[in-house]
Each structure stands twice: as C-alpha cells, then as structure tokens.
Amino acid sequence: MQTIGLVGAEKCIRGVDIGSTTPEHDIPLYAYLYVQGRFRLHELISKEIALDEIDAGCDAPHDPAVTRAVITGGLD
C-alpha cells in the first residue's frame, strides 16, 4: 500500500467491522424484509461453498463471476 499521498491529499485509512452497520437494528430489519419478500437475499449470493470444499473456495475472490460467496454446512 502506498501511503505517500495520504497526508497531502487529506486521506485517511479507516477500518470497519461488518461494514458500517448497527447489527442490533439492521439484522432484525433485514430479517423482516426477507420474510416479507422485500429483500431478495438469494439474488445477492452468486456462489455457495460447502465447508468441506473451503480450500477450493479460496479461489472464489479471483473469479469475476463470483460477487458474493457464502460458506454453507458445518453446523451439525
């Protein structure tokens, strides 16, 4: 990462945890909208990766056809 232009251009580096969300508000809202059929969650997922195929799933970020991958399984 090049940091030369940070100060002169008044840029900053900021970390986030789960994006800029308020989980106690947003997650119930998303669940409500999903149940109402107004939040089409399945359309956001472009690939499902089984937990036992996680090693092969590491290539997903390099595949331009994969916009959002979800790891499934392993909750037995």
Image: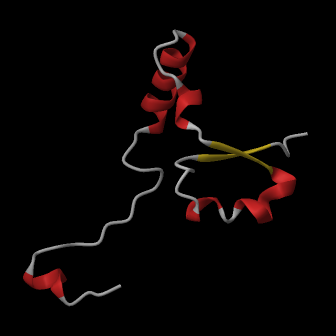
| Number of marks in picture | 0
Q: Residue furthest right?
A: 76
Residue 54 vertical placement versus 25 (above, below): below
Q: Quadrant of the N terminus?
A: bottom left
Q: Is residue 6 above or below residue 62?
A: below
Q: Quadrant of residue 31?
A: top right
Q: Residue at x 40, y 58 (%)?
A: 16
Q: Position of residue 30 (x, y in %)?
A: 49, 25
Query: Foreground residue, 53 or 30?
Result: 53
Q: Is residue 12 left or right of residue 20?
A: left
Image position of 31 (left or right of 7)? right
Seen as rendered, the residue at the extreme bottom is 4
Report the front residue among 9 and 69. 69
Q: Position of residue 27 (x, y in %)?
A: 51, 30
The colour scheme used to paint the residues is: secondary structure
Residue 35 spot, x, y in % from top left: 57, 13
Q: Is residue 53 left or right of residue 8?
A: right
Question: Residue 45's x, y, as percent?
Answer: 59, 38
Q: 44 above or below 69?
A: above
- Could you tell me which residue is drawn at 40 percent across and 42 percent down? 21
Looking at the rendered image, the quarter that the C terminus falls into is: top right
